[in-house]
């Protein structure tokens, strides 16, 4: 496997993961009440806890994208 293939892998990995987080944020912002009712079928969550959980997980997901997708991509661009 050459460096260009790995570079393309990390590029697409970053793009797909960013699309996923934007989709998640969009559904959360536009359909928050529906999402809360949907999860409320299984879990008893107050609205403030529901918001905190989603914002925390979105932050963790963003950090994961940065650490595992974007930083390796930038590193490969620098050494390439």
Image (tube, rainbow, N blue to C red):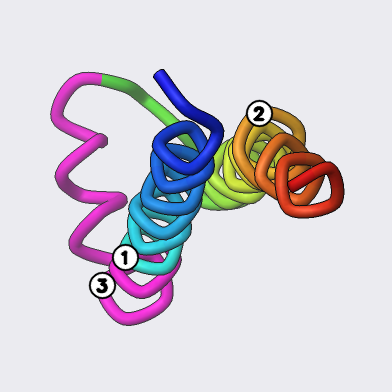
Residue 27 position in % (x across, y down) = 29, 67
Asked where in the image residue 30 lies, by quadrant, the reply is bottom left
State the extent of the magenta-drawn residues as a range.
25-42
> For numbered disc 1, what is the local secondary structure?
helix
Q: How many numbered circles does the render carry?
A: 3
The residue at the point 71 percent across, 35 percent down is 72
Q: Is residue 49 visible?
A: no
Q: Of marks 2 and 3, which one's residue comes earlier in the chain? A: 3
Kindly report which numbered mark, 1 or 3, lies closer to the viewer in this rendering: 1
Quarter of the rendering occupied by the N terminus: top left
Kindly report which numbered mark, 1 or 2, lies closer to the viewer in this rendering: 2
> For numbered disc 2, what is the local secondary structure?
helix
Check residue 23 in the rendering and tell me which mark sits there, or answer none.
1
Indicate yes or no whether the magenta region holds residue 75: no
Judge from the rendering whether residue 67 lies leftward or rightward of residue 47; answer left or right.
Answer: right
Task: Find the distance from the CA under tag 1 to the CA under tag 2.
Answer: 20 Å
Residue 51 position in % (x across, y down) = 57, 51
Check residue 31 in the rendering and tell me which mark sits there, or answer none.
3
Check residue 57 in the rendering and tell me which mark sits there, or answer none.
none
Check residue 68 in the rendering and tell me which mark sits there, or answer none.
2
């Amino acid at each position: 496997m050459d460096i260009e293939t790995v570079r393309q892998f990390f590029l697409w990995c970053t793009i797909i993961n960013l699309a996923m987080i934007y989709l998640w944020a969009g559904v959360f912002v536009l359909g928050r009440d529906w999402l809360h009712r949907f999860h409320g079928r299984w879990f008893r969550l107050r609205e403030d806890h529901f918001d905190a959980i989603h914002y925390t997980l979105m932050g963790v997901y963003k950090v994961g994208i940065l650490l595992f997708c974007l930083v390796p991509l930038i590193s490969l661009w620098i050494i390439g």
